[in-house]
């Protein structure tokens, strides 16, 4: 039982860590793009996108909860049809 719990926890942590790294790399790419772009409007848009990505780090850590919530919504939707 303990080994199963440890395996599930480690898989969760690996996926969460991969999502956080992916989000961090996207923000770094947006910064690099912002340095290259000259237009003030484009820089503003890129910065807004980076801020949006930064604010959603919590979603990377709570992705399991969103799966269950969305699954419950789908079940309710299927029952209503």
Image (spheres, rainbow, N blue to C red):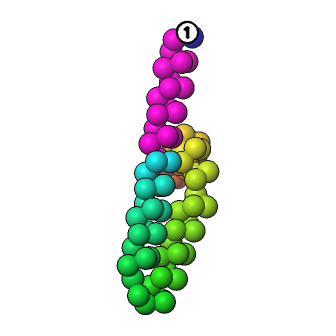
From this viewpoint, which residue is outermost toward the front?
A: 35
Q: Main secondary structure of the magenta part?
A: helix
Q: Nearer the viewer, residue 52 or 62?
A: 52
Q: Is residue 67 magenta?
A: no
Give the magenta range: 3-19
Q: Is residue 76 visible?
A: no
Location of residue 72 with respect to 30 vertically, above or below: above
Total numbered badges shown on the rendered structure: 1
Could you say whether the residue bearing mark 1 is in a helix, strand or loop? loop
Q: Is residue 37 visible?
A: yes
Residue 64 percent coordinates (x, y): 54, 40
Location of residue 42 with respect to 23 vertically, above or below: below
Q: Is residue 17 magenta?
A: yes
Q: Quadrant of residue 72?
A: top right
Q: Nearer the viewer, residue 7 or 40?
A: 40
Q: Residue at x 48, y 20 (%)?
A: 7
50 sits left or right of 33 in the view: right
Residue 69 percent coordinates (x, y): 58, 46
Q: Residue at x 57, y 11 (%)?
A: 2
Q: Residue at x 57, y 61 (%)?
A: 54
Location of residue 70 with respect to 17 vertically, above or below: below
**Location of mark 1 (residue):** 1
79 sits left or right of 29 in the view: right
Q: Residue at x 43, y 51 (%)?
A: 22
Q: Quadrant of residue 1?
A: top right
Tag 1: Cα neighbours inside 10 Å, few (<14), some, or many (≥20)? Answer: few
Residue 67 percent coordinates (x, y): 52, 44
Residue 13 percent coordinates (x, y): 52, 33
């Amino acid at each position: 039982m303990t080994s199963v719990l440890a395996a599930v926890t480690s898989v969760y942590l690996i996926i969460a860590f991969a999502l956080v790294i992916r989000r961090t790399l996207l923000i770094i790419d947006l910064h690099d793009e912002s340095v290259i772009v000259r237009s003030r409007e484009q820089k503003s848009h890129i910065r807004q996108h980076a801020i949006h990505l930064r604010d959603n780090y919590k979603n990377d850590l709570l992705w399991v909860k969103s799966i269950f919530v969305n699954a419950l919504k789908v079940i309710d939707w299927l029952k209503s049809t």
